[in-house]
Image (cartoon, coloured by chain):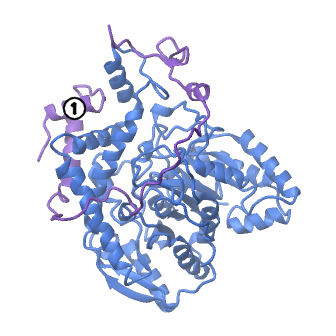
Amino acid sequence: MLNATLSELGAALAAKKISSVELTRACLERVERHGRELNAFISIDGAHALERARQADARRARGEGHALTGIPIAHKDILCTRALRTTCGSRMLERYVSPYDAHVVERLEGAGTVLLGKCNMDEFAMGSSTEHSYFGPARNPWDKRLVPGGSSGGSAAAVAARLVPMATGTDTGGSIRQPAALTGVCGLKPTYGLVSRYGLVAFASSLDQAGPLAKSASDLALLMSVMAGFDARDSTSIDRPVEDYTRFLSAGVKGLRIGVPKEYFGEGIEPGVRRAVEEALRWYEGQGAKRVDLELPNSPLGVAVYYVIAPAEASSNLSRFDGVRYGHRAKGYSDLMDMYCRTRAEGFGTEVKQRILVGTYVLSHGYYDAYYLQAQKVRRLIARDFAEAFNRCDVILGPTSPTTAFAIGAKASDPVQMYLNDIFTVSAPLAGIPALSVPCGFDEKGLPVGLQLTGPHFSEARLIGAAHRYQQATDWHLKVPKETPL
Amino acid sequence: MSLTPDDVRRLARLARIAIQPEESGAVLDRLNRVLDLIDQMRKVDTQGIEPMAHALDVVQRLRPDEVREANQREAYQSVAPAGPDGNPQLHDGLYLVPKVIE
């Protein structure tokens, strides 16, 4: 059961082969056994989960409910929940309990999912390894000496280790897709504006999107059907008709035009990653998909542009943490200015402070045009590259990350080494387009490799369909890490 | 171009973050590495390119100017930070901060 897809779990619950209470107990036992070592969770509330499970069973017994009713879920600890504290992996919010639920949380609660706990993450979603958490690093279930990626590393590790069948994450520069790739699970970053940001603690508002992590592409479709939708409380939410994200699940890939950018297969990619991704590409070609070689000439600038725009927006967003209305306040201070400065020095970790300082610099008088405005212009060039590419192809294929999982501490001393890990994931949020990552094999060390599919705005269903077709012919997504056997 | 220790002090002040003298060297080094990385996008010719501030070309949605929110002061203030005495820094529904006007 713990390796079943969401539709299989939903069917088993509907057929009364298993109850939500039993399923929730099984997940809680796995969390008990592996959760602490993986450090995948910041908060867990078993009693609350079992109460929710009993409600879900009652709902199903009345013949009501949704495909996901009774299935346990974990939320990234950046999505506000009334039931459990929302820390953002930060000392600043260590004891913060939100007075309201995020839109995504509301939707998933409404569908009857069972909230098991809140997942570990890089502080305020700033990082690619989940090492920058006030609550300590999360670990990769494929090798506990390694990072699970980040910033949604706790969510990815929890799904990979089969502690929970589904989880939420957020993606600003790759924070859903890169940890999905590094832990061998599936993750989708939706089109900007498709999933409401209400109740998602803001990092970089023009880039942030919440999305699902789960074991299969069809799981992502089920989750998107619940998570996506208009919400008036998010001023950037898109008001468009509700979509069926499962509608391409039975479509073939014959004739699908797959764009292969030369920039995604250049230097700096580990041989094991290249081999697995090229093999997946050959599989698609073997199924009748058409390979379209193309260029995204501005995409190598993505990391530089991202590390101007995201810190700039973060420095503005995180100014709200001033010790006055919520969160940490320093114990001793001489005046108001001193209270702000001490509160923020104590409450934020090194990486967050560094990004706030970079953001402050690129927005400051005399530097705004050279950095922030220039970054916004190059951002448009990157988006144009994609728009032109999608005149010639339906999806773009490449590696999610240039490497498989790396050792905890290996990139901690040099921020730039860590940032370069985002090279293939930053462009989609900059352009506002959807992208997903699915497992496509293992490298010579036995570590999972992620395949990234990127599409034009609102092409989620198409991306999910193409990934699902691949998963019907392969079983990479069903492999369970050796260190967390079923 | 590189930042100086004076730049770091100025930025820290603007960002309202206290930096201890013993940390400032490491902070400066990391900031300069990041600025080196982002320098590569400064050389790009962007003459005539419109800055992209938003991921989608959409017009800001407007709503009728009417009251929608209920007053939730108590719920929102229930998470106010504690002061040195351990109590929430609130008084008559207002937040307490150190005195700024003599």
Name which residue lies at 24% across and 51% down: A372
Classify residue A231 as left or right of residue A385: right
Assign the C terminus of chain A to one quadrant of the image: bottom right
Q: Quadrant of residue A43?
A: top right
Classify residue A105 as left or right of residue A144: right
Q: Which residue is mark 1?
A: B24
Q: Mark yes or no: residue A144 visible.
A: no
Name which residue lies at 15% across and 65% down: B45
Residue projecting furthest to the top: B102
Image: A183 above or below A234 = below
Q: Give the chain coloured blue.
A: A
Question: Residue A479: horizontal and vertical position, in percent?
Answer: 59, 68
Q: Mark 1, residues whose alpha carbon is within 10 Å: few (<14), some, or many (≥20)?
A: some
Image: A439 above or below A147 = below
Name which residue lies at 43% across and 66% down: A433
Q: Mark yes or no: residue A210 visible.
A: yes
The kind of residue on which mark 1 rests is: Ser
Q: Quadrant of residue A444?
A: bottom left
* Closer to us: A84 or A197: A197
Question: Residue A362: horizontal and vertical position, in percent?
Answer: 23, 45
Q: Quadrant of residue B5?
A: top left
* Closer to us: A272 or A339: A339
Assign the N terminus of chain A to one quadrant of the image: bottom right
Q: Give the chain coloured purple.
A: B
Name which residue lies at 55% across and 80% down: A470
Question: Residue A302: horizontal and vertical position, in percent?
Answer: 29, 62
* Closer to us: A41 or B57: B57
